[in-house]
Amino acid sequence: MTLLKRESLIFISLLAAVLGFGFEHDIMEAGRTAALIAAAVLIGAIVLASTRVAHHAEILAEKVGDPYGTMILTLSAVAVEVLILAIMMQNESSPTLVRDTIYSAVMLDINGILGLAALLGGLKHGEQPYNDDSGKTYGVMILTAMGISMVVPEFVPETKWHYYSGFTILAMIALYGLFLRMQVGTHSYFFSYSYPGKLRDLSTPRDDQDRPATLSILVILFGVALIGFLAEIMSTLLNVGLEGTGAPVALTAIVVASISAAPEILTAMRAALANRMQAVVNIAMGASLSTVILTVPVMETIALYTGQPFIMAMTPVQTVMTAITLIAAAINLNDGETNAIEGMTHFVLFATFLMLSVLGL
């Protein structure tokens, strides 16, 4: 009973999955409005399940400490995003879904999460210190990964796309392999910061930390599988609900990016308000890098194998917004301290991203 109470969100999501599976065809026959309502409910269930996955990833992160801790957090979020994208690619006809989702995730992570956290943390604590080596390393790798996989493809002829796609997959694997070696090896100190006293980098309850790691691992595995099942039903219902409405593909992309980022937002806000900006930088910038460097090779491999239409080149508006975001991040994360002004600049960029998305740009 204690386990049922503690993991009630997982069981609520499981109930939603069972009901969705049982009534999927009835809902689709009921019309577009019913399909949209059901899809929204399932999205909520996915968020609940992903929150528990992130919580248990956070428990594991507490046990192993940085930089392994934030790596576990970001990888769990990316795993959820990749799983949802892979499923939705089978039901979604748009060749730009993956591109728009990665772009949305970067805007949400850097401008949304980092911007809001630095803004709120700056208003409460003033200047907040962190290790500036981490910001610089994340920034240059995100720039390189997005440039190779989402800017250069604009200039690659369609007849030669398969060759360049294969190269991109190998390049992303090589980049991530080296980054992983740096993060957990000789340069691990780039991604950690020594706070005064005995502050913990993350704020999970003490009784959760005392539970065995095996339980957290099992919940994470079950939660990811449940999210995949929910995503399959949600994708079908969402397509039925949006069919013929003229809704931009970016809307679906923002939904997918928001689902994977939802738990990270809560963790980053808690860390910022507790004056632990290093955790915020690792979560926001690390999630952006992991999204690009891991999602691209997986999705491009699926596209090459299935022969599905696939477009990775960003639009001019997306390229400009990405460039402004990375330039602002390079300037703001250059001195080892964040403040409310720097946070506000990123949050305004996030608001601009949302406005452009509403306009269909």
Image (cartoon, rainbow, N blue to C red):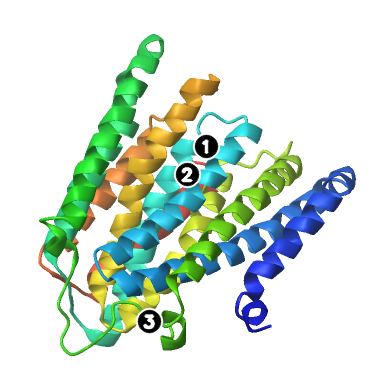
Q: Is residue 63 above or below residue 32?
A: below
Q: Amino acid at mark 1?
A: Leu
Task: Specify the label residue 272 is tagged with.
Answer: none
The residue nearer to you, when weighing 352 against 141, is 141
The residue nearer to you, when weighing 218 against 134, is 218
In the orientation shown, which residue stands out farthest toward the bottom?
Answer: 197
Q: If you read the primary sequence from the N terminus, does the residue marked by circle 3 or circle 2 appear first?
A: 2
Residue 129 percent coordinates (x, y): 16, 76
Of discs 3 and 2, which sits in the foreground?
A: 3
Left or right: residue 93 versus residue 214 is right
Query: Rounded to the nearest whole Å, what is the CA distance between mark 3 and mark 1?
Result: 35 Å
Q: Which residue is labeled 3 in the image?
A: 203
Query: Rounded to the nearest whole Å, what is the CA distance between mark 3 and mark 2?
Result: 29 Å
Element under label 1?
Answer: helix
Residue 111 visible, this orientation:
no
Q: Amino acid at mark 2?
A: Thr
How many residues crowd around disc 2 within 10 Å: few (fewer than 14), some, or many (20 or more)? many
Task: Specify the label residue 101 is tagged with.
Answer: 2
Q: Which residue is labeled 1 in the image?
A: 97
Query: Rounded to the nearest whole Å, what is the CA distance between mark 2 and mark 1?
Result: 6 Å
Give yes or no for contact between labels 3 and 1 (Cβ–Cβ under 8 Å): no
The structure residue drawn at horizontal position 27% and vertical position 71%, both measured from the top left corner, is: 65
The structure residue drawn at horizontal position 64% and vertical position 72%, both measured from the top left corner, is: 9
Left or right: residue 66 versus residue 268 is left
Q: Amino acid at mark 3?
A: Ser
The residue nearer to you, when weighing 335 against 90, is 90
The structure residue drawn at horizontal position 18% and vertical position 47%, both measured from the top left corner, is: 140
Element under label 2?
Answer: helix
Residue 233 percent coordinates (x, y): 72, 47
